[in-house]
Amino acid sequence: MVHVEIKAEELFAIGPLIVTNSMVGVLLASVVLLLATWWFTRRSAVVPSRGQSMIELPIEFLAGVVRGTGGKRWRQFAPLILAIFLYVLVANWLSLLPGVGTIGLAEEVDGEKIIVPFVRAGAADLNFTLGLALISFVAFIAFGLRANGLRGYLKELLIAEPAYMTPLLTPIHLISELSRVISLSMRLFGNVFAGEVLLATMLALTTATVFILPLAFVVPGVFLGLELLFGLVQALVFALLSMTYITLAIAEHRQHGSDDHSGEAPEQGAAPAHGSA
Amino acid sequence: MGPDQGDNNGAPPPNWGVAFDLGLRLGISVILGVGGGLLLDSWLHTSPIFTLVGMVLGIGAAMYTIWDVAKQSMGR
């Protein structure tokens, strides 16, 4: 029986805190990342071993992307972008492990037996993706404030040019800003949740053919491979869009040529301005 | 890591992530405008004034997003 609930299922409650299976998935991702960080910082060497090179590969790749496209101040936000990328990547890939989404408690709902899994993909819960999007939103507002100052930022956000267009353009501008958060969160949630549904459907379809090898193993295997790729792409898209928003928030400052509030020395050969938002 | 600028290390072209973003933001802008208008109308009992205003603002926000993204891309 194919059963994928759109909202995360409740496992147990600790006082007022309801623990859901997607929270367990996200906690597992956090633990994996923390353990990897602990192991990596203890055993890393200047001349990397083969294992260290494997771990450094995605980090070096994304650092290259941030360095290449993040403008002059890429060092300020590179750690945040890398953290978002690794967090989403690990949470996505953990959901492909055997047992995630399939091992759980059997419950009867409306006369049908369903399984409530102990662990569910973190990003298949809108709460997780919305939380990450809000972190990203706060980050690019903070970088905008740092570059423009509070007055400059509010002027940029609320006052249009020419000034008589302000009553029309300010709500349009606010809707456009808000759409970034929703777009970031809905894209990740939609893709990961659709992947979960696809995998569950493929497993259900091919379980009946378990005696006709290799169909029962090959078909879900192909889709698991695709999910591996989609997990990477979605993590990359989320991180790069966050970076783009931050870069634009800083670039607005450059174009308008106001004073630097970040406390940094002006940089030589600044990148071309990206327009105002 | 490396120097502050220069090499792209085989990185994707600048702003390529925006292509993933634009389509979704267009729809969300309209939904936000109409949704906000519907909420205001149900709260103030002024239907359909704010729904229509919200729709116009949402479509305006979608067009503004296209203009903004195009301007940023051309700026690069």
Image: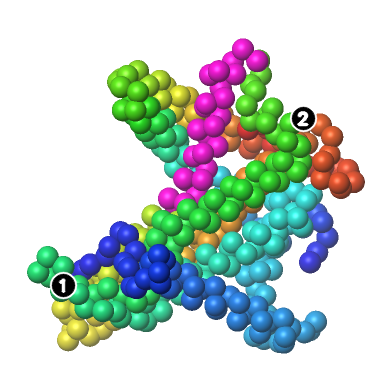
Q: Earlier in the sequence, mark 2 or mark 1?
A: 1
Question: Closest to the observer: A9 or B8?
Answer: A9
For the stretch drawn in magenta, the main secondary structure is: helix
Residue range in magenta is: A163-187
The kind of residue on which mark 2 rests is His
Q: Quadrant of residue A156?
A: top right
Q: Position of residue A16 (x, y in %)?
A: 40, 65
Classify mark 2: helix, strand or loop.
helix
Seen as rendered, the residue at the extreme left is A111
Report, in whole angstroms, how far the alpha carbon at label 2 lies from the one at label 1: 62 Å
Residue matched to label 2:
A256
Residue found at the far front of this picture? A15
Q: Which residue is found at the position 24% from the left and 75% from the top?
A: A115
- Foreground pick, A95 / A53: A95
Horizontal and vertical percent position of residue A59:
66, 69
Can residue B13 be seen in the rendering of this structure? no
Residue indicated by mark 1: A108
Looking at the figure, which quarter contains the N terminus of chain A?
bottom left
- Say left or right for A236 vs A71: left
Residue located 63% across and 37% down the image: B73
Q: Is residue A125 visible in this depiction of the protein?
A: yes
Residue drawn at x 52%, y 67% as measured from the top left: A89
10 Å neighbourhood of mark 1: few (<14), some, or many (≥20)?
Answer: few
Q: Nearer the viewer, mark 2 or mark 1?
A: 1
